[in-house]
Image (cartoon, rainbow, N blue to C red):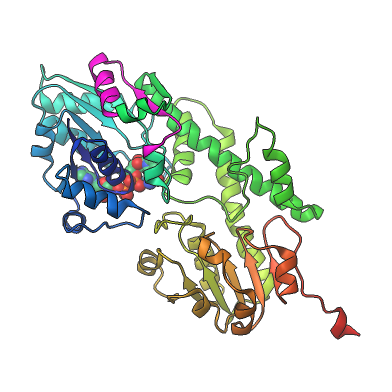
Amino acid sequence: MKICVVGSGYVGLVTGACLADFGMEVTGVDNDAAKVEVLRAGEIPIYEPGLKTLVRQNMDAGRLRFTTELGPAVEAAQAVFIAVGTPSLPDGSANLQFIEEVAASIGDHLNGFKAIITKSTVPIGTGKLIESIVRRHAGEGQDFAVVSNPEFLREGSAIEDFMRPERVIVGTDDARAQDLMLAIYSPLRVADVPFILTSVESAELIKYASNGFLAVKISFINEVAQLAESLGADIEVVARGMGLDSRIGPKFLHPGPGFGGSCFPKDSRALGQIARDHGQRFRIMEAVLEVNELTKQRMLDKIKAATGDLEGRTIAMLGLSFKPDTDDIRESPALTILEGLLAAGANVRAYDPAAIEPCRALLPDVTYVDDPYAAVTGADAAVIVTEWNLFRALEPQRLKELMRQPTMIDLRNIYEPGKMAAAGFHYISVGRPDGRPSTAVEDK
Ligand code: NAD
């Protein structure tokens, strides 16, 4: 089957490569000519484990190609996936400009029945909007069906998530489009992945409600962590005790510097706006977003409390991406923390295994280094912002020898307070008592 995927970003590229791996003939379309150039050369413009190999294998097998020309790709395809961005507008609602442009172009090139499938996260009602735009551009009598097939992949494990999803949502009221979708995803059906076949509107709402709920879990545990700090409790034990209850589950109960990335903040805002558009207030989502902003600020307060006046201090930042195994810094808590540190007059030395270049483009006043030990050299404090595995394996003794002050603020709780204290660190984490080096011997 011939498939066109419009948008070759995180979602479009993974979708295209995985569908090609399912045996489909896929053309990836992007209007960013530089990106297409990179892809055609067998390179990938983002950091995503395993993606380069999968893209290359399928390109070599002749099942995957890339172009800036949407027309011929749409004309040849039976199924057209839309995977362009839907960023936030200033009022929090999703910006549908790219979706509308693509729908119009698809309409201009419609030549017989096709399924037009939205992978992008779009507000409820967008399916209808796409239908009306395509119809206007295609002219009366053209046959097509709109499908909502929201994507749940996580950056960093995107291929595994696409190949082994916990569910696939297919929203359409057209039986032919539904059959087409089931054929496209037949390798997943054979693997017993649950499919939810529903309306476009329900499919669109499932995506927002899922992301909204995950954001609730994160903000909830972050507020419990703050309470744990006041009470002298240990959030890691509390979260484990909560998570063993199967009604709650252990996932997304990790306290930290707040959620970021290209989905949770924007989708939480959009869910609130969708509710307002329908005369409701989604008060929980409003609270979740407020808590998230306060959480990021609280992390800055932690750093300030640990170091005193930040003016002229050198702070090492370990991690910039919003989560490990990605170069994505969109709405990363690291950005808020970096900006706060710079505004307070600190000198920042930052290291991240994948996200230095996108961060440098935004914040050139930071000193970027290519090694975590180089980042902490001469630092008054080290701040762990992203839980890259690499940071779990750092040698505390070596860090201490390189730093001016052995102060670590671990915003991901990757170390044990007792061990860090024993290594001579003043160790501050989230929702747990601080670790302080024993001074009992020297005091005598
Ligand atoms: P992205 O910004 O990485 O990719 C979007 C791509 O679309 C870009 O390469 C851009 O050049 C291209 N594009 C924009 N307008 C175009 C046009 N008119 N013609 C052709 N190409 C065009 O975005 P993303 O992270 O892949 O997200 C895409 C959508 O998927 C969003 O709605 C997002 O909410 C949703 N989503 C993202 C993730 C994630 O983890 N990134 C997960 C699930 C869902």
- Residue at image position (57%, 71%) is 394
> Of 90 and 5, which appears nearest the observer?
5
Q: Is residue 38 left or right of residue 170?
A: left
Question: Based on the displayed image, in which of its 4 quarters is residue 381 positioned?
Answer: bottom right
Question: Based on the displayed image, in which of its 4 quarters is residue 361 positioned?
Answer: bottom left
Question: Based on the displayed image, in which of its 4 quarters is residue 303 positioned?
Answer: bottom right
Q: Where the N terminus falls, by quadrant? A: top left
Judge whether 45 appears above or below 108 on screen: below
> Of 41 and 285, which appears nearest the observer?
41
- Residue at image position (32%, 30%) is 187
- Residue 266: image location, x then y, percent: 44, 44
Q: Is residue 363 left or right of residue 301?
A: left
Q: Is residue 102 magenta?
A: no
- Residue at image position (72%, 68%) is 419
- Residue 360: image location, x then y, percent: 38, 70
Judge whether 309 appears above or below 132 on screen: below
Does any portion of residue 343 appear in the rendered image?
Answer: no
Number of marks in picture: 0
Judge whether 403 appears above or below 124 on screen: below
> Of 273 and 160, which appears nearest the observer?
160
Judge whether 59 appears above or below 274 on screen: below
- Residue 443: image location, x then y, percent: 88, 84
Q: Where on the image, by quarter, is ligand 1?
A: top left
- Residue at image position (69%, 37%) is 244
Does any portion of residue 63 appear in the rendered image?
Answer: yes
Q: Is residue 169 magenta?
A: yes
Q: Where the C terminus falls, by quadrant? A: bottom right
User: Which residues make up the magenta segment?
Assistant: 163-185
> Of 220 and 345, which appears nearest the observer?
220
- Residue 349: image location, x then y, percent: 49, 76
